[in-house]
Amino acid sequence: MSAIPLSHILILASILFIIGFVGVIVRKNTLYMLMSLEVMLNAVGVAFIGAGSAWQQADGQVMFILILTLAAAEVAVGLALLIQMQRKFKSLDIDLLSKLRG
Amino acid sequence: MSIAYMHTILTLLPFYPLVSFLLLISFAKRLSWQLAASLSVGAMALSALSSFALVWQLSADLPVITTHLWQWFTLSSSEQINISFYLDGLAAVMICVVTGVGLLIHIFAAAYMKEDENFTRFMAYMNLFIVAMLMLVLADNLVLLYLGWEGVGLCSFLLIGFWYHEKANVLAARKAFIVTRVGDTAMAIGLFMIFKEIGQLTITDINESARVLWIAGDNQPYWIALLLLGGAVGKSAQLPLQIWLPDAMAGPTPVSALIHAATMVTAGVYLIARMHGIFLLAPEVMTYVAWLGALTLLLAGVAALAQSDIKRVLAYSTMSQIGYMMLSLGAGAFSAGVFHLMTHAFFKALLFLTAGAIILALHHQQDLFKMGGLLKRLPFEAVLFSIGLVCLIALPGSSGFFSKEAIIAQLFSSPTAGPLLWVCAIVGALLTSIYSCRLFFLAFMGSARFESPLQPSSSKLVKISLIVLAILSLVGGAFGTALEHGLSSVFVAAPMVEMVNDPTWLHAVAIATPFVGIVFSWFYFSKYREVSHSPLVENTSAVNQFAKQGLGFDRLYDWLLVKPYCTLAKVNRSDIFDQLMMLNAWYVTLWHEVLASSQNGKLRWYVAAIGLAALLLTLLLMLNVGEVSMEIS
Amino acid sequence: MSMTIVMCALLIAGILAWFAEKLRRHSARNIALMSVLVTSAYFAFAVFTSHSAVNYGQLQELVRVDWIESLHIEYALAVDYLSLVLVSLTLFLAVICILVSWHEIKEKAGFYYFNLLASIAGIIGVFTAVDMFLFFFFWEVMLLPMTALIAIWGHENKHFAAIKFFIFTQVSSLLMLVAIIAMAMLHAKQTGQLSFYYLDWQVLDLPVSLTQYLMLGFFIAFAVKLPSVPFHSWLPDAHTQAPTAGSVLLAGVLLKTGAYGLIRFVLQLFPDASANFAPFAATLGVLSILYGAKMAFAQQDFKRLVAYSSISHMGFVMLALFSFNAIAYQGAVLTLVAHGLSSAALFSLAGMIYSRIHSRNLADMGGFWQSAPRMGGFALAFAAAAFGLPGLANFVAEFLSLVGAFHVYPMLTILAALGLIGSAIYGMVLFQNSFQGSLRTPDNRQFKDLSIREFLVCSALISLLIVIGFYPSLVLVFFQTADLAQVKDVLEGATL
């Protein structure tokens, strides 16, 4: 089984990351934004795993597990906020939440 | 009388009116007319009696009485400024005039102002004025003199604006104060200079030190004398600061008599006579004094010819008579100047007070063209007024005659005056007699031009004061020799004017001049004196208007000084320095707005910005890495 | 004598007043008044008892203990006649301040009196501190409550004025802080030990090329406080917007801290550098005199007019101080006292008028004399004091300043004397527009004359002005022997 070259994995990770990033920017709905955020996190995870296997070290996988945990925690908080937002504003439009403008 | 006794009298002299002032101002309207009047007049009477007692005691053996009250402040280890009084011949003449004429005017005012609701306030100011004037006259140093000088200015301001509801009075008071303040500032600078050059401010010391330190024509006495002259012209309403006096007639008539005729306006004359030691060392300034006096004399004479307000005629007449005094001082005839000051105080007070009585009888009518024919209707006032005018014109035998003759006689051969100024004085005398005749004709002859019935005052107080003043005006010339004698010890340094070379026709001309004027007016102003039924109209030609407005000085100063100052103030109302400082604030605000606009609160914008920045940084990093690696290779 | 007790008493009374107001209405003002009276009495007693034994002609150390040992910062207080005179003025005006706020302050009165007393304590600290770090500390202590006074109890534009005041003084005092630290470092360099102690600094021997910059740092801080043109523009806003007592305190004593700083620090620490700088500073003084007088004339707002007149008066102080002349120095010190009283009087008057017609605009005033003759009389006297009528304290002060300055700068002094005309003009405008003329609105017919409390304030101020006007030795006697030696040394240094 020939190894997949690192560059392919990194290109995949980049594409995933860009898809996620564009999703965060263009979607107004906070739920989709959170989902795009997950995509971005996973893109980073892919990059870590790829790098770990390329250098034959476990650090990449350790980092991926850390990212997974982090993503889980983040999703928990994010969804909780989302529910509060839905209750308070009756909407999930992120642009409504611009109280911090200068 | 023992000397200690006299010290006490001198010390207390200014305090009677001061106490009266304090009582009047504290109790104000709670005092009845009787109480207020007797308080203020009583204080004046005490002062007047004390002055006469003091003057009686002055003699060749005792030419000077001084008294020290307390030390005011210290300028240097050698020079202390004291509150001390110094009474010599010159001061003696002044205190007699101030308290004597002041007393008579107070008596008159008590009756004249009886109906005014602010009677006590009025009498209080009058008393305060006397206090300040006495300080001015009795001061032994120039700083105390300055205190009196400013004090009389303040009282003058208060009394001109006594009826402060009228905008015009308020403005007249302001004008008087500020114009004289210009002169006062010159005088203050003169004081600084005297202290710098001599190190002293006590009057007798200055006069003595100046004689020792300098010779005639030196630079320092020139400037000092010039600055002091600045103060004198401001207070005495001489060119170029004469513009305030006619407007000052807005005040009640007793004020015009006391302050703007008899006493305060002659303070400038007093100052120059007082500081004669300095002036004698500056012959050029003496000549300026003479010329300013002469020019004012002519200017005021011309202006008086065109006035329609009886008080304004008298005001211009005052200016021109003070011009005579200045002329006399400039010629070095100090005694003659002071003599004229005294006689002028008598007859001008008489003229003003009588004018006041007439104005009151006519229900506050001051316009000459609305008077006429008063000779038969108000005979008492008419007689008194003509006595005053006779003195003013200087007909032989009257007090004005003696004093004016004394001045004119010394002009011709004086080193600092001369024939040209003599001619000015004669022309001035001619003008005086012409405007006096015009005034007399307009007011007392011709047809009656007023509608409402007359209301002559029946008050005894008015009559007494007027009669006493009339007597003083008539016999005032008799004080001449006594005055000459008393002043001789003061003006020791003044060189005697040699009159031996004068042509003999000088006297004849001087005596004849007033008569020429009277004859001229008799024919020229015939329409004023004849009874006719056609209405009398004022001459409204441009020349007449120009003269009526005081020869355009008001407009000139308005255009030259007042307008630019006001414009400057208006343009810069928001303070250019503040604007400059606020530029900083504006700059900060600008950046605040630029940066704040990027903080739009939209989360997705922030995300985009972060992404963009990361991208940029990465690119930058890559470029840099490239450069670094190139450098290494 | 302990100035610490005076300051602590004022601070504690301030805190007490703050809490007491919550328990009982109007208790704050009583506590404040009592505390100031008691401390004044203590102060007067302490000065009189120590007066014969101690020579206040020189700085007399009162207390000196370590505060921040690692930096050799000490808590050190010392007084001489200059401090004593200014502290007396401060305490006197403190009473006036409390009396004029008696009915004016209705909201948050407790906190108000706390700020007032804290500011006064800070000012007293400024006048007595001789450790420069401590001085700077007090300098800030007096500033913050003052800003609060303006920002909370001010008029319509109070926030703007408070911020402007705060920024001006902060920026300028930062320059001073830099100079202070630099001086301490220089001391360390010369003697091997850091020191913020004033008397230590006096013996330092520094080249003029160096001290001129340090001098400038101090000078700018004090010139802003004084204030001198062109750093004056905070003052009209602050004065106009501050509550009456704030204006009284600002004009009466806060400005004097600037003059005090000039005398104590600029002139005495850097005599040579100041002598080199003197012609420039004197010119600034004259500029302030003329510009202030001209601006005062242009104002429509009563308080703004008085504020600009303060700038004009403080110009005399600047001119007199930088003349390095013994007579002018006396004049400058007397101007501090005289102007403290006369401007306080005019601001109190503005407060009294404001409480009646709720306007500071001169166009709304006029004809008040009719129904308020007593107030009119006082207004006239105070205006007369402002334009330097002889017989009132300001005249002697200005006269001495100008006589002294004339010896050194004749031309500048002649220009400065033109300020006498300018002051007459704005004085007339002030008095005549408000009290003479006719009534502007029929409501003003009910314009009330002075109440007993107001009468007390006015008569206390006017009697002091008259007493000092006729017997200035009351103040000057201390300065004929005291700091003159110092000034003389400086003068001699300047002529070399």
Image (cartoon, helix red, strand yellow):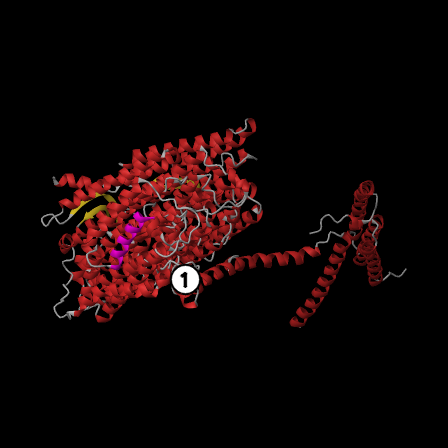
How would you classify the magenta stretch by its main secondary structure? helix
Which residue is located at x 26 percent, y 63 percent?
A: B429
Which residue is located at x 21 percent, y 70 percent?
A: B418
The residue range painted magenta reads B378-393
Residue B567 vertical placement versus B9 (above, below) = below
Q: Which quarter of the picture shows residue C216?
A: bottom left
Q: Quadrant of the C terminus of chain B?
A: bottom right
Residue C78 location, x and y as percent?
Answer: 36, 42
Residue C40 location, x and y as percent?
Answer: 39, 34
Q: Is residue C197 visible?
A: no
Q: Is residue B330 visible?
A: yes
Is residue B12 found left or right of C269 in the rendered image? left
Chain letter of disc 1 in the image? B
Is residue B156 found left or right of B469 in the rendered image? right
Which residue is located at x 44 percent, y 48 percent?
A: C432
Q: Residue furthest left?
A: B61
Is residue B58 found left or right of B197 in the rendered image? left
Q: Which quarter of the picture shows residue B26?
A: top left
The crowding category of the residue bearing disc 1, from other C-alpha atoms within 10 Å (few below 14, some 14 to 19, many at least 20), is some
Q: Residue furthest right?
A: A1
User: Which residue is labeled 1 in the image?
Assistant: B554
Q: In terms of secondary structure, where does tag 1 sit?
A: helix
Q: Tell me the amino acid under the disc marked 1.
A: Asp
Q: Quadrant of the N terminus of chain B?
A: top left
Which residue is located at x 14 percent, y 63 percent?
A: B495
Residue B567 location, x and y as percent?
Answer: 49, 61
Front one among B542 and A95: B542
Is residue C347 rendered magenta in the image? no
Is residue B215 found left or right of C266 in the rendered image? left
